[in-house]
Amino acid sequence: MNINDFKTTLRVKELPNELEKLIEFDFNLSDNKYYYSQGFEINPFGRGGLETWSTEEDFLNQLIPFAQANGSGSIYAIWINDNNQSLSEMPIVVFGDEGGTHVIAENILQLLHLLTYDVEIIIDWDKINFVKLKEEYKESKSLGKYLKWIKEHYNLEQIEKPEEIIKTAQDKYKLSFDNWFNKYYKQ
């Protein structure tokens, strides 16, 4: 699949430049048999996974689902909020496969930085976590390629504390996202 196929599947005319570069990396440079960040997988879901939350067109039109967030089917999406920002500046949200929706990053570049932590995200109704237990952690086989790529393209190093990126994003967008989301979904 190429960028144009990806856009067609998502029914969008453009994607953030950072996401296009990641898709190129994913499709062309990484070893497709192995993850470069645990549980993360580029996947143009279309609207399917989001329709379990709401089928309203206004809801679906403000989200661009672009990746699997964990091995159980949670979804990362760009939330097209009303702040007249470029797509590269739009917040990233995660929809848990067993419940919970959360702002995860201020923008796509911050999500790319979170991926360097190389731990599968845990999502529940109240919170999100990246838990790295030293005795159980096993590095993704293509993580080294990803770390080299992100350093070359964005001069970013592997992070040690993902919660800092998440907190900054939630401080900025959680209230507005929750207010928007609650128009379409009631618990």
Image (cartoon, grey):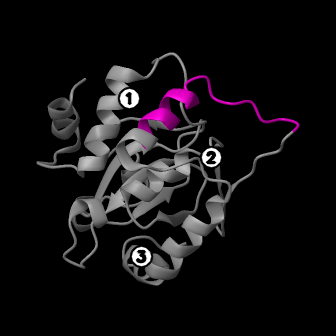
Q: Badge 3: how crowded within 10 Å, few (<14), some, or many (20+)?
A: some
Q: Which quadrant holds the N terminus? A: top left
Measure the C-alpha gap from mark 2 to mark 1.
Answer: 17 Å
The magenta region covers 135-150
Residue at image point 49% right, 57% down: 94
Q: Is residue 141 magenta?
A: yes
Residue at image point 33% right, 24% down: 27
Q: Amino acid at mark 2?
A: Tyr
- Left or right: where 25 falls relative to 156: left
Does any portion of residue 45 appear in the rendered image?
A: no
First in sequence, mark 3 or 1: give its number: 1
First in sequence, mark 2 or 3: give its number: 2
Q: Which residue is mark 2?
A: 117
Q: Please, what secondary structure does the residue beneath circle 1 have?
A: helix
Q: Amino acid at mark 3?
A: Phe
First in sequence, mark 2 or 1: give its number: 1
Q: Nearer the viewer, residue 135 or 181?
A: 135
Q: Amino acid at mark 1?
A: Asp
Q: Which residue is mark 3?
A: 177
Q: Looking at the image, is mark 3 or mark 1 nearer the viewer? A: 1
Q: Position of residue 127 (x, y in %)?
A: 66, 66
- Left or right: where 43 falls relative to 64: right
Measure the C-alpha gap from mark 2 to mark 3.
Answer: 25 Å
Q: Position of residue 124 (x, y in %)?
A: 66, 60
